[in-house]
Structures are given as C-alpha cells and as structure tokens.
Image (cartoon, rainbow, N blue to C red):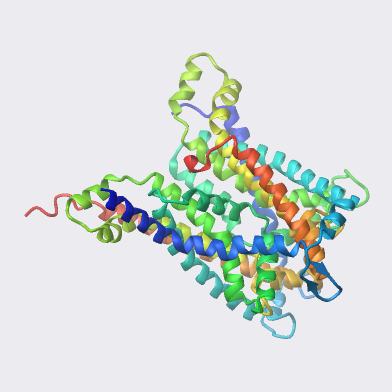
Amino acid sequence: MQMGRMRAGAVAWLQAAPMALVLLVFLVAPIVMIAIVSFWRATEFSIIPAFEFDNYEFLFGSPVTYRVFLNTFKYALITWAFTFVIGFTVAYFLAFHVRTLTWQIALFLLCTIPFWTSNIIRMISWIPFLGRNGIANSALISWGVIDEPLDWLLFSDFAVILAFVHLYTLFMVVPIFNTMMRIDKSLIEAARDAGANGVQILWNVIVPLCKPGIMIGSIFVITLVMGDFITVRFMSGSQSANVGRLISNDIALLQYPSAAATAVVLLGTVLIVIAIMLRFVDIRKEL
Amino acid sequence: MEPRSRSFYVLAAIFALFLLFLYGPTLTIGILSFQGEGGGLTFPMRGTSLHWFRDLFEQQAVGDIWGSFRRSFALGLMVMVTTVVVSVMGGLAFRKRFYGSNVLFYLIITSLVIPSILISLGVGLMFSQSGLTVHWATSGFGAQLTWTLPFGLLIMFAVFNRFDKSYEEAARDLGATPWQTLRHVVLPIIAPSLIGVALFGFTLSYDEFARTLLTAGSYNTLPLEIYGMTTNVTTPVLYALGTLTTVFSLLMIGVFLCVTWFATRRRAAKGSDAGSGLV
C-alpha cells in the first residue's frame, strides 16, 4: 500500500515535471533576474552588476511614479466597473433568458470568437470609428448634436477605457456565465414561490451564487489592465501613462535596471491585489 | 412555453448592442480595406478596389509580412502542440496528491496574472546576460508558453472535475494497465476538450504581442510586424493586413470548432458499444 502510494506520487511528479520545468525557466528565473537587475547600475549603453538601491530611491522619490500608479489604478477601476456591468448583463441574458442549450452555446461562442483574434488589430479598428473624421463624429454632426468634431474621441483616456472594455469584457462574461449555468434553477423557483420579485431574486439569489465567477473575472480584468502598456500607448496616442508604459519607456532607453525596479514594484502591487481578491474565492473548486 | 417577459426584449437588445460593439469596428476595417486607391483611413470610401491587398503582396511596399506570417504560424503550431501535451500531463498529475502541487498551482496562477511585460523583460535580460541570443523559436517560444499553459491547465481542471471516474475503475477492473486505461479510455473521452486546448494554444500564440516583444530577436512575428506598421504606415494597407489576419484567425477557429463538433458527434454516435459483444 505504502509502495503503491509512493509510485503514484512519482508518476504525478513525472507528469507535472514538464510544466514545472517551463515555469521555472520562463517564469521564476526571469522574475529572479528582474529582481537582481533592479539593484544594478546603468550607464548610457550598458548595465553593470552592483548592489545599490538607487533605482528604488529614484522611483519612490519621483512624483511621476505616484501619479502613474494612481492613473493605473484609475484605469483598472473604471474598466472593472464597465466590464462587470456589461459582462454580468450579457451572462445573465445567456444563462437565464436564452432557453435552449444550442442557442446558448452558439451565442456564447459568438461572444468569445473576438478573444481569439488579434488585440492589436482590434485596437486599430477603432481608428475609422473614433477619428476626427470618423463615423462617430460625422454621425454626431449630421444629427446636429455637435458643430465641431470632438477631439477627445481618439487618443484620449476615453479611447483607452473604451479599448480596455472592448478587449476584456469577455474575461468577465465567461466565468460569470460558467457559475450562472451551475445555479440550480429550482432555487430561483423557490425564491419566486416564496414571493420574491425579479430584482430580489437577482440580488439575493443569483448575485451571491455568482460571486466566485465575478471574482475570477475581476482578477482577470484588473491584472490585464494593470499590466498593460500597449493599449494605453496606442489608444492615448502616447499622451497618457500607466506603469507598464513607464517600464516600456525605460526599456526603449535601455535603462534596464530602472525598468526592472519598476517591474518589481508593479508585480508586488498586482500580487497584493490578487491575494486580497483570492481570499473571497477558491479558484480550483470553481472550474 | 410561457411567453417572453418584457425584460427578455430589453436584455436581448442590450446583447445585440454588445455584439455590435464587439464586431462593429472589425467589420468597419473589413469594409475600409477595400478602399479605393486614393482613399484614406476613414470613410468616405473613394471607390472600391483590391489595391491595398495587392500592396501587401509587393515585397518593398511594407516590411517582411509574409516572413513574419510564416514565423507566427510555425510558432503557433509549436506552442499548440507543447501546450496540449504539457497541459494534459499536468492535468493528470493534479488529479493525484503530490508534494509541491500547491506551489505549482500558485506558479500557474502567477503565470496567468503576471504583467506580460515582466516576462518579456525578464526572459530578454536572462538571455542577454547569459550570452544567448533571443530568437522567436527559443526565448519567444518559452515566453509564450507562460501565457498558454495556464489556460491549458485550467481547461484540464475543468475537464477532470467533470470526469466520471467509474470509467477508469471499469477499465481497471477489466485488467487494463494504467497506460491502457489512459490511452483507450481517458484520452478518447477528453479528446474534444483537447481540441479546445489546442485552439487556445494556437490562437493565443499567433496573436501574442507583449510577451514576444523583447524575446523574438531580430525576426519579427506577425503581431510585432503589425505593431511596427502602426507607427509608420498611414494607408489602408494596415486595414488590409488586419482583415487578412483576422480572416485567417476566423478560419482557424472555424476549423477547430468543426473538428470539435465532429468529434463530439462521433463520440455520441459510436460511444456506446453496449450489446455488440453479444453474439
């Protein structure tokens, strides 16, 4: 018996080994590397091993850092609010108002297909819509709502948030839909028989039962937005900054140690946010 | 059936708007990529033409698009196969208790939530400092796996959580070895889900940008090439390329979905051989 269990353990180890190996080489080692380099020194064209806290001192001493971190949280929070409301509504419609499984799967797939296409193309595709002579401006002018084209549609915080919501709402829809599909329909009938109205059922039965899905979706959206650099750069026309852009700017200037220090702080921030959110949900149980 | 409530129509309208929001912009550039020769990046259309698509096939007009497409395609296949194999093995491992499984699980979650630019920067630094050259097929490949493997493993969790263990017990009772059980019982049952893992592996790799940015080396993958174009190309050729690669993605998704559908149907039709053993 003891032997058998040991063998099962060994088999499990072998099966997990490739995944562990990939993660050690391409996840753990790079993080360690970044942590080490964050203490190095940089000249204009090379980086020199050292152990000094200058990069962190500069980072925490600069008011830009705080502004950029604040901006990052702002993007995360606003995007989260929009993706949650839209994602929940869409998932609710699919789970409770579409009646046959075939239609549910078909409409669900329709929602997920854009996820499998290129994010960059999806960002580019907002240009003809939001541009100065774009569809939105021409429509508003022809309706007489505005006289002059609006400048803040493209290359602004508005465009950044719009692109985030466009790209990431799906990450809310999928987990929330998944938990909704597992809600026992008899619970809802019980609530209705007990005299609850639609809003009460939604608020007191469905939302609490969807909490794990909401949490998983929120983790996805918040981490994706906090770690992003490309959407902010492209959609703001390089006018706004978040932490990811701070890092990528340093990289472009070959200031790797300072990029690494910022990256360490960003990773720490993201992990703290996740740790707080994970207190509310056991991911493995929910899949 | 009871009649539809009023909230159904309201929600259906919201859902339709959501779909319009999802697909509208992509359809717009699809239309604009047929822009006439003198046309610009926005409406109105100045006639229709295939000019911008033709431009794509001329080597000098834009960068090395076809080379980058070939690389992205090859890399996508590499990542796809690796993701499927490693995820299935990992999924099987996690069905048992093993020492360190919690650590591995948290690593997977970290891999999923870590800002992509950290992987890019870390892998890039690691390679350059140890004297290796970054190349899309080595460092780029590994960096992309940190994005596809978590999805693969999480799908496997979902699959095995719903897996009926009595099939395996039946196989074992009939004298099958663990390998035979896996090969003839478990794998055929989970096969349609594996196609899903493959779809994730391929498309996530094919479209990956952030994790490949500093790890692809001197030869660009397609998303990197497109990103480069956004800064210096201001003609609808950008839309033409976007339309082509989106159509390609859609074709791949269609292929994967069809295969899944057939696999599921085949399994439903031939899954039971009850009674066929009787004379």
Horizontally, is A45 left or right of A187 in the view?
right
| Whether residue B121 is situated above or below residue A199 in the rendered picture | below
Q: Quadrant of the C terminus of chain B?
A: bottom left
Q: Furthest residue to the left?
A: B279
Picture quadrant where residue B222 is located: bottom right
- The residue depicted at 85 percent of the width and 51 percent of the height is A60
Q: Furthest residue to the front?
A: A51
Q: Residue A37, how many percent across, how many down?
A: 74, 65
In this orientation, which residue lies closer to the viewer: A261 or B147? A261
What is the tally of numbered marks visible in this picture? Answer: 0
| Whether residue A147 is situated above or below residue B250 in the rendered picture | above
- The residue depicted at 77 percent of the width and 75 percent of the height is B37
Horizontally, is A106 left or right of A50 in the view?
left
Residue A202 visible here: yes
In this orientation, which residue lies closer to the viewer: A116 or A61? A61
Q: Quadrant of the N terminus of chain B?
A: top left
Q: Residue B121, how many percent across, how many down?
A: 70, 65
Q: Residue A263, how many percent across, how many down?
A: 74, 57
In this orientation, which residue lies closer to the viewer: A33 or A225? A33
Q: Residue A148, how many percent across, how many down?
A: 93, 51
- The residue depicted at 73 percent of the width and 69 percent of the height is B227
In this orientation, which residue lies closer to the viewer: A73 or B260? A73
- The residue depicted at 63 percent of the width and 47 percent of the height is A220
